[in-house]
Image (cartoon, grey):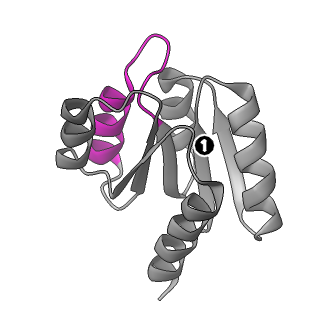
């Protein structure tokens, strides 16, 4: 599996920040501003990890997560959300997310989680 990481967030600043930080760590990133775009992009790519916002325009992050799990069960998913509703986070984890970070998130902790997952995928 490649080292591609997809960032799915409707906030351009977050996509840009995470893309730059992860690029500096040596990863190839893709970015999508909504769930529909993310699902279209992931269909043609070998994506190892998805950083997924739960609140997206048009299609919820939870629905995006479920569709990714259906079509690409080996892809790891880390949730990012500004809405710390424990029910939503619990549902995301039950649907296959490996971690959940609340916004504003600790960038160093998120990058460490990405590195850990990517390392496990390479092993």
Q: Is residue 11 above or below residue 101?
A: above
Q: Magenta segment range?
A: 53-71
Residue found 79% across the figure and 60% down from its top: 23
Left or right: where 15 falls relative to 44? right
Residue found 75% across the figure and 31% down from its top: 13
Residue found 36% across the figure and 51% down from its top: 72
Q: Nearer the viewer, residue 80 or 61?
A: 80
Q: Read off the residue under disc 1.
A: 7
- Percent from the top left, x then y, of residue 92? 26, 40
Is residue 1 among what the camera can see? no
Residue found 25% across the figure and 31% down from its top: 88
- Percent from the top left, x then y, of residue 12? 73, 27
Q: Is residue 62 magenta?
A: yes
- Residue at the bottom extreme, as displayed: 123
Q: Is residue 27 above or below residue 40?
A: below
- Percent from the top left, x then y, of residue 57? 50, 13
Secondary element at tag 1: strand
Find residue 109 and report its image quarter. Answer: bottom right
């Amino acid at each position: 599996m490649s080292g591609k990481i997809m960032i799915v967030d409707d906030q351009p600043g977050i996509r840009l920040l995470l893309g730059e930080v992860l690029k500096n760590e040596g990863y190839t990133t893709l970015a999508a501003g909504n769930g529909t775009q993310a699902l279209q992009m992931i269909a043609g790519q070998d994506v190892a990890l998805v950083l997924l916002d739960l609140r997206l325009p048009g299609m919820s992050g939870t629905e995006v997560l479920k569709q990714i799990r259906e079509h690409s069960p080996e892809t790891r998913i880390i949730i990012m959300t500004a809405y710390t509703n424990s029910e939503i986070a619990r549902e995301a984890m039950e649907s296959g997310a490996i971690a959940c970070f609340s916004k504003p998130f600790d960038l160093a902790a998120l990058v460490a989680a990405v590195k850990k997952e990517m390392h496990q995928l390479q092993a």
